[in-house]
Amino acid sequence: MTLPLSTDIPRYGADDDTEQAWQWFHAVCQLVATELAVQRPGTLALVDDGDEVYWLTEQDGFCHLACAPTHDGEVVTGAAARVVDLAGFGVDELNYKREALTRWLMNQTTMRVGDPRLLQLPVGGDTA
């Protein structure tokens, strides 16, 4: 990708333990984004045996890491969001996501979509 990676980590607005888990999750997300940035556009990181996918999306002049669940091998784009816009996760969920991404960094299982435009998120993080 030719745009710079967004490295902003917004405050999660939770207790100290959750905030720390959020910061660690984003540190690993930035490593994943760096790895995906050298891949061809439309490359998806398959995490947790393909239960969730991550990819880079372009917004506001930056590349942002986005994610979505999968169902029956299909990416549920209606539930996609930029990682910085995720909300409602506790410490255990954030740690689980971080550990899954850490495992991905070790094996880097990927797939590509033919038309990367299918992975664009609505402007402003609106997923509704």
Image (cartoon, rainbow, N blue to C red):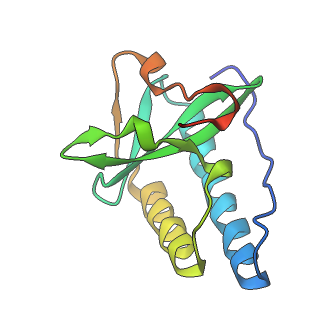
Vertically, is 105 above or below 19?
above
Q: Quadrant of residue 65?
A: top right
- Which one is nearer the viewer's eye here, 35 or 8? 8
Taking the spot 66% from the left edge, 26% from the top edge, the residue there is 123
Q: Is residue 102 left or right of residue 88?
A: left
Q: Nearer the viewer, residue 69 or 107?
A: 69
41 or 52, which is in the foreground? 52
Horizontally, residue 67 falls left or right of residue 91, namely left
Q: What is the number of callouts on the image? A: 0
Query: Would residue 70 appear left or right of 66 to someone viewing this image?
Result: left
Q: Is residue 25 above or below residue 119?
A: below
Furthest toward the front, the residue is 128
Residue at 31% over, 55% down: 51
* Left or right placement of residue 119 versus residue 63 in this view: left
Camera-nearest residue between 55 and 32: 55
The quadrant of the image that shows the N terminus is: top right
Position in image of residue 105 (x %, y %): 48, 56
Q: Hey, which residue is sitting farthest left in the picture?
A: 72
- Quadrant housing residue 56: top right
Q: Residue at x 69, y 26 (%)?
A: 59
Return the x and y of residue 3 as percentages of the image width and height: 72, 23
Q: Position of residue 108 (x, y in %)?
A: 41, 49
Picture coordinates of residue 89, whole percent (x, y): 57, 69
- Seen in the picture, residue 57 relative to 6 is either above or below; the reply is above
